Amino acid sequence: MVSCCFHGFVCGYKGTTSLKRIEPYRLRELIIEDLKIYECSGVRDIHQRIGIEIPYKKVLEQIKAMLTDGTIESEGKNRWIKYKLKK
């Protein structure tokens, strides 16, 4: 039996925490914070810094949504596109 630090009750341990199912609003904030620190970055760089356990497609979808709503802007073409916060 495993005891918790909260009055010795048994915890309902369900496994390790993962970022695979991160909510879109949290992912958005992670991307914004990353771009505040690293002003001009590619998708792969952003993905690697915020967590490789988050699916790449999810990061890419959120970046496209942020481009559409005007939160960020892009520079370059194809594989060399860099993203930065809109001023």
Image: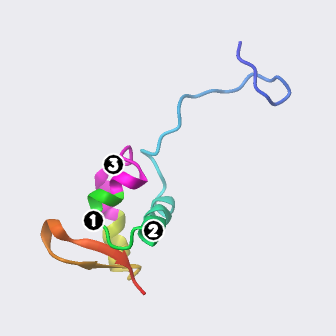
Q: Amino acid at mark 2?
A: Ile
Q: Is residue 33 left or right of residue 72?
A: right
In the picture as drawn, the residue positioned furthest to the front comes out as: 38
| Residue under pointer 3 | 55
Q: Position of residue 75 (x, y in %)?
A: 23, 79
The mark closer to the camera, 2 or 1, is 2
Q: Residue at x 40, y 49 (%)?
A: 51
Closer to the camera in the image, 23 or 35: 35
Q: Quadrant of residue 10?
A: top right
Q: Main secondary structure of the magenta part?
A: helix
Question: As drawn, is 77 to the left or to the right of 19?
Answer: left
Residue 7, horizontal then vertical, whole percent: 86, 27
Relative to residue 39, is residue 33 drawn left or right?
right
SS of the residue under disc 1: loop
User: Badge 2 is on which residue?
Assistant: 37
Residue visible at 41% across and 79% down in the picture: 71
Q: Residue furthest right?
A: 7
- Res 67 quadrant in image: bottom left
Quadrant, the N terminus: top right
In the drawing, what numbered circle is on residue 72? Answer: none
* Crowd class of label 1 (few under 14; some 14 to 19; many from 20; radius 10 Å): some
Residue type for callout 3: Pro
Marks 3 and 2, the one that precedes in the sequence: 2
Tell me the kind of residue under disc 1: Gly
- Magenta region: 47-61
- Residue 66 quadrant: bottom left
Query: Which residue is identified by label 1?
Result: 42
Is the Cβ of the residue at disc 3 closer than 8 Å to that at disc 2?
A: no
Report, in whole angstroms, how far the alpha carbon at label 3 lies from the one at label 1: 16 Å
